[in-house]
Structure formats: C-alpha cells, structure tokens
Image (spheres, rainbow, N blue to C red):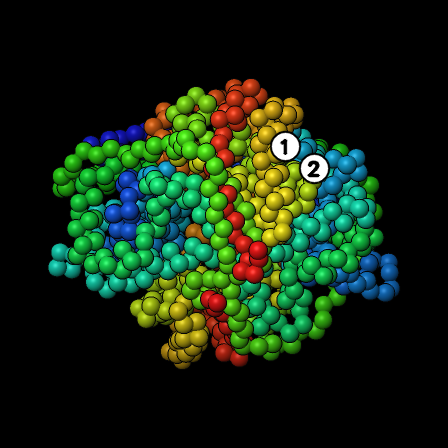
Amino acid sequence: METIQINDNIRLTCIGMTKLKTTSLGIYIHRPLRAEEASYNALLPLVLKRGSKLCPDQESAAKYLDGLYGATMGASVLKRGEDQIIYFDAETISDSYAPEGEKLLRALIKLLMSVVFDPFTENGAFSEKYTEQEKINACDRIDAFVNDKRQYASQRCQQETARGTDFAVMHYGDKDRIKSISAKALYEHYSSIITSSVIDIYICGAYDSEEAAKAVRAYTDSLSFTKAEIPRTEMIERTEQGVHEVTERMDVAQGKLAVGFLTNTPALSDDIYALAVFNSLFGAGAHSKLFNNVREKLSLAYYASSQLEKLKGIITVNAGIEFANFDKAYNETLAQLEEIRNGNISEHEFEASKIFILNLCNSYYDDQRALVSYYVSARIAGSDDTLEDYIEKIGRVSVEDVVRVSKKIQLDTVYFLTGKGEA
Amino acid sequence: MELTFRKNDKTGEVLYSGRHCSGLEIYIIPKKGYSGAYAVFGTRYGSVDSEFVVPGDTEPTSVPDGIAHYLEHKMFDQPDGSNVFDKFSEYGGNANAFTSFNVTAYLFSCTANFEKNLETLLDYVQSPYYTDQTVEKEQGIIGQEIRMYDDNPGWKLFFNYINCLYQNHPVKKEIAGTVESISHITADYLYKCYNTFYNLSNMAIVIVGNVDVDSAVSVIERGIKKNEPFTEPIKKIYPEEPEAVASHYAEKSMAVSTPMFMMGFKDTDTGEGGDKLLKKQIEISILLRMLYAKGSPIYKKLYDMSLINSTFSLDYTMQPDYAFTSIDGESRDPEQVYSVILEETEKTLENGLDREDFERAKKVMWGRYVRSLNDIDDYAVTFMQLLFMGIDYFDYYDVYKTVTFEDVEKRFRQHFKRENAALSVIKPL
C-alpha cells in the first residue's frame, strides 16, 4: 500500500492487487451528515455524473466508457456513522488484458477527475436541465426506499434508535429540500465543498502510482484548498429507561420485526473486536444464536439476523415473521441476548463466530472494493488497524471478552412493520 | 482419475477437468495468489422439473411444485440430527445453496481448511435424510420465505412478466411453490426426486480459487459414495409451448413508491444449447446494448422525457428450451415506456443498425467476460450454469470472435418483434 499526499485535503492511496484482472478507482468526499446540507450532497454526485468538460453528456460518457471495453462508472452517496460520503466508483479491465495494448486506466482516471473537478457548466452554474432531471431521480430514490421492506424496516429501526442525533438524517436527503435546490445554488455548494473537504482517492489493482498522482494533480493544482478534517461520529449514550416502541402499518404479507440496541462500546475502544465477535455470535450468520433459535428451532422466520453500526454504537436485529408471532420472536431475541450474557456459549459457537469474521476479512484480499472499503471505514473511525492487525485482534478475543461487552448492550427500540388490518 | 489440462492464452486462466467413473463431472480452476476458494456441487434439476420419467421406469412421475427448493432446504439435515452449517462453521466454511429454474446447487467459500470443507460438501449432498417430522418442520420456514417474496415487488414484477410470455412452460411457476403446493410434500416424494436427480451422472462440481488440484481431486475421489450412473438421460416432461405470448400486459398493485416495469421479448428461436446458444446470447446482449443502453438514442429519448431513471437495466435469460430479454426500471408511465421502446425499435429496424455501435458493444462483451473471471463465486456459478446448457465458458473467446455485424442484424430481425413483446407493471396502491 502506497500513500501519496496530493495536498492538505487530497490523499491518493494505491493498493496492488494484480491477481484480479481489473483495476478499480474510488473517490470519497467526506462531508458531515447534517440536515442542512445532506440534500445538496445527495444530489451533487448525480448531477456531476451527467456531464464533465471531457464528456459533456451521458451519451458521450457512455461511449467513452464502452470504448474502454465497458469500463464502469458510478456516483452515489454513502453513510458511515455521521460521515456522508459523496462517492464515485469506477472500474476497468487492467491494461494487460487490453487486446490492443490500450492505456485503459489512464483514460479512466482522466474521466473520473474531469467528472469530479471539472464539471460541465453553463453561465457559472450546473446545467439547468441536468439539475432538474436529477432532482426527480434523487426524489425517486428517496421514495423507492420503501420498496424493499426488509431494508426499510432495518433502516427505520436504526433511525429510531438514533433519534435526536444527526445519524437519523437520511443520507439520500429530504424531498422538499431537494426540490428547492437550484442549479446555481448547487454549483455554489459544489464550489465551496470541493476545496474544503477531505477527499480520498483509492486505486486498487495494477497501476503506476506516479503517473496516477500526476493525473490527479493535473486537475487539482489550479485549485486552492482550505484544510479540512474527516467528520467524526459520537457514539449514542442514553440514560433514560424504558423501551422506545414504534409500529408502522403497510399493505404487506409479512411482518418485519426490528430491535435496536445500544452497544455502549466506542469504535476506538479495545472492546470493539469483542463486540464484532459478539455480533457474529448473536446474529451474523448460520452459526449464530438467532439463526439457530428463531429460525431453526422455532421455525418463526426465514431470516433472523443482527447488524452492527460500530461508529454510532447500534446493533439492529431483523426478522421477517407472521404478524401474530411478534411476541414469540421478540422474546426469543431477548432470551438469546440473555444466554450470551450468562455465558451460555459453546466452544463450537464461539470458534465458529470468530472464524466467520476471519473468513470474511481474508476474503477482502480477493475483492478490490471490499478491501478499499475496509480501509475507508477504518480511516473514518480514526483507527490505525491494518486489515492484518484487525484479523490478529479478532483472533485474540476470548469468551470472557464477549460476555463483558454483551453486558453493556442496552435494549433501546422495538420497531414493527405490520399489516394494515392487524391489531 | 485422469484430468485434462487447458490454458487460455487470452486470459491466462487454467482449467483441469474430468469425469469420474460414477458419472460426476469435475472442473477445477486454480487461481494464483487468491486467499479464498469456492466450490459448487450442483445438479441439473430445478423448479421446472415437476414431471419426469425416472430412468428404467415406463410411466412418468409427477410431484408437487416447489419440491426442488424444498429438497434443497432439507439436504441440510443430517441422519444424526445435526445441522450441516455446524460442520462448515467448524472449518470456517461459509456454506449456502440455491435453487433456480433449472439448477439446484450447494456451495461454500472459505479462506482456510479447503479440503475439510470440500469433504463436508461432498458428504452431505450425498446423504439424504428425510422423515415426515423433519419435512413438517420446514413448512414454517419456507412459508416465511414465500411470504417474504410476496412482499418483494421486484420478484412479483418478474414473475408476472414471465407469466405474460409463457402459456404453459413451468418457468411460469414460483420457484418455492405456494404455501398450498408445499403442504403436499412428503419424505417419499423427496426421496423419489433425490434418487432421480441427484444421481452423480446428472451432477457436476466446479472449484475456483486457491486450491491444490491434486489434493482436491483425492478428496473428491474419496468422498464419492457408491453410485450407479444412469445409462440413459432423465426424461423431463414439459408441456408444449406455443410461440405466441400468453398476454401482452399484466399489472399488480403493491406498497411501492413509483410504478415499476419490466418488458421485453419472448425468444422463439429456441431448442439449441452449446456454442449456438452462447453465440445467440452474445448477439442478443450486443443488441440490447446497442439499442437501449446509455449512449443509445432510445435511452436518451426516454431519459429526456423523464420516463426512466438510473434504475434502468437490461438482461437476457436463457436456457436451451426457453429464453427472453427483459428491460426493467421505474417509471411514472410504464405504458409510455413500452410504446416508445416498441416504436423506436421498429424505426431502427427500418433504418438499420450502425456498424460502429456494433464494434463498441462487442468490445464491452469482452470486457465483461474478463471481469467475470475475477470473483470466484460468480465465476464458479456462471461456469456451472453454462456447463449445464452445454456451453464451455472457458473458451468463450472462440465463440465471441465469430460474432459478426451480419449475425447481429439477422438476430435483430428475429428477436425484437412486437408480437412477442409483453409488459408487466407494479403500481403503487
């Protein structure tokens, strides 16, 4: 891994992975997740992708990419804790597989740089047409959120668990705010953040790092930057007692139970590794307590799983169930947490929970996006762990560590998506 | 066991393959430098196979819909009452299985203990154990799986679409069956299907990743249980499917935000597998790209009219005996999308295709192929699915290079016909 600091804000990281036949590129622009600017940040990548000075419209960009043997380019917005990331992702087959010896990576970097740093403009603003069309798309994306009920219930539960904090802000933005954004206002926002945000550029695959740095500088040297920091996320701590209950009704055939817990373990604490093993044991896979009890033993659900949000300190449990089985599934979820707290963990369960994580981490070495995503997440958390460090620290977690972190877990929110006619 | 070695100069990939005397086909693709390895053990048996003649029998057998998928779930139960997931998790194998229209497959990925995991895979897939009690237990779990799909608008959109295209073919039916159909499944039925379709001569194993070929082969040889290969093929009975579509339109209301659509064309030029099928697949994929992908005039028109958004996607599903294209996305006005696409396609038919567009789209197919060799999971599964259609994915290039502009022009006239088109819509409540 090689890191080149382009300027105060922009950092280029190159990771070699030539066993794959592709090279991937990622650009991450870090912004604090706040209601005031979330809608701008959500709309921005969609408009930027529509046109750059190099390829002023979708058609020319599509042809440019097709000419690179169908290289891909995507633009979206991600959420890591309270870091709202404007994200560009691109991939090409590596130069050594180009039948005519073409320089594919060089051409792809150029396009991506042009999209991010040299957008297509009209009279000092983004194109009116592009902005209006992408506002519709951005609103559709928010509306479409409800289509996948499993994901919807899970996200809603996370939001409810994080109530009152910026984490509850939707990273896709707010429809009313998006509708009010003009092409000019969006361009002003762009101009102000592009030089005042931390920007991470990752290349993973086969590359010449000096040449890549040069290609980046060609687009950034003329800009002047204001030094920025990566947004930090504060873990939720809540002293009040009582469970926050939320029920939503929709025309659905299956109920979705989601339970939100606070971990009370900060992302930089030494206990974070034990918390990851706890989550694996509790509900992350076919070896877990929830899978084996809620699904296999009680036949209540096809899926019953838990997810960890390290930065904000939330674990969410999700299960798709018959409406009438709410109590059974909820009680069993809490009972399985209690089992772990009481140390009722077999050696097999414990080892399987660790191996599951280790296996997953080792598989990142074969996946460019997953490996980069690990490093981006670590950087946002402020952790210096390399993937090797992380694997090693997971390996050292003991049963006692897991029991200790389980005792800090605090029930917070119960969310239920139920049918319209249900009680 | 003798293995054949091949190397592909265009991609640098290598392949070892052979057939065991039990009838099992074996394919191993070692990948240098990878951490992970992936194995998939599959059978030519899917949700469409509810009626068949067992080799040796004279009369056809008929079983309840959804049984292939049910059988897949029940393979995880072991005679000693244990669960296969436990064994895999002991060795760090991440195990799973899937049932599609034509394939049932059991698989795992791991980054350590490959041989132990492979041993486990071979063992459990060859150890059927069903009792009426264990069969009963699964009703609740699969019932919830079916309910989950009932709430999945993308899934309903797809099934309504193929129900427009097909009058009789069982691809119309839900893979998991219905709550009613699975209530008729018994241990006896499961054994009947198992003993027919899980004969090793109907199966293959594909391994991709960080593996030692010799030790993988010896694990397989040791792991193969007694098996008498069939000397004749299993006769699968499908009802006769007319060329005409069942209907041009279907709609359903569900809890979604924007209407969703899926449209496309029923492929009436069917009946061939192997190289011919692969060639057709390349031709149609090139055409989809030329006609409707970003960069095409039709896409631009739809986007500028705000009829489509970025969810727009193109696909071609194929088997030797059925195939169809599909174009899907979200739209305020799906019927308008349908009529614009059909009209503009007809205009292009009159005006002709552009040779440069063809060259560009063909380049994209090559990039896509090279990219598909990256991910060991997808590579192995694609390899097996195509193998079962008689296609050699390893030598994709040999077929790819034969595709000409004239082939694509001919395919264009053959496939993209209004009378074979249909539209499925999911509307908000």
Q: Locate residue A319, reporting x and y percent.
A: 57, 45
Q: Locate residue A395, reporting x and y percent.
A: 53, 22
Helix, strand or loop for disc 2: helix
| B249 on left or right of A40 | right
What residue is rendered at 35% in x and 51% in y?
A172
Residues tagged by mark 1 and mark 2 found on one chain of the structure: yes
* Camera-nearest residue between A332 and B131: A332
Give me the chain letter of mark 1.
B
Q: Residues within 10 Å of mark 1 (few under 14, many from 20)?
A: many
What residue is rendered at 17% in x and 51% in y?
A188
Along the polypeptide, which appears first: circle 1 or circle 2?
2
What residue is rendered at 40% in x and 40% in y?
A162
The dot on residue A265 is: none
* Camera-nearest residue between A255 and B42: A255
Q: Amino acid at mark 1?
A: Ser
Name of the residue lying farthest toward the front: A241
Helix, strand or loop for disc 1: helix
Residue identifier under label 1 = B89
The quadrant of the image that shows the N terminus of chain A is: top left
Q: Locate residue A13, reporting x and y percent.
A: 31, 33
Task: State whether residue A294 is above or below residue A114.
Answer: above
Task: State whether residue B155 is above or below residue B43.
Answer: below
What residue is rendered at 54% in x and 50% in y?
A256
Q: Locate residue B207, reporting x and y percent.
A: 61, 40
> Would residue B113 be visible to someone looking at this image?
no
Q: For the residues marked 1 and 2, what is the alpha-carbon distance in whole angstroms?
A: 9 Å
Residue identifier under label 2 = B84
Q: Amino acid at mark 2?
A: Val
Residue A59, quarter of picture: bottom left
The quadrant of the image that shows the C terminus of chain A is: bottom right
> Would residue A166 be visible to someone looking at this image?
yes
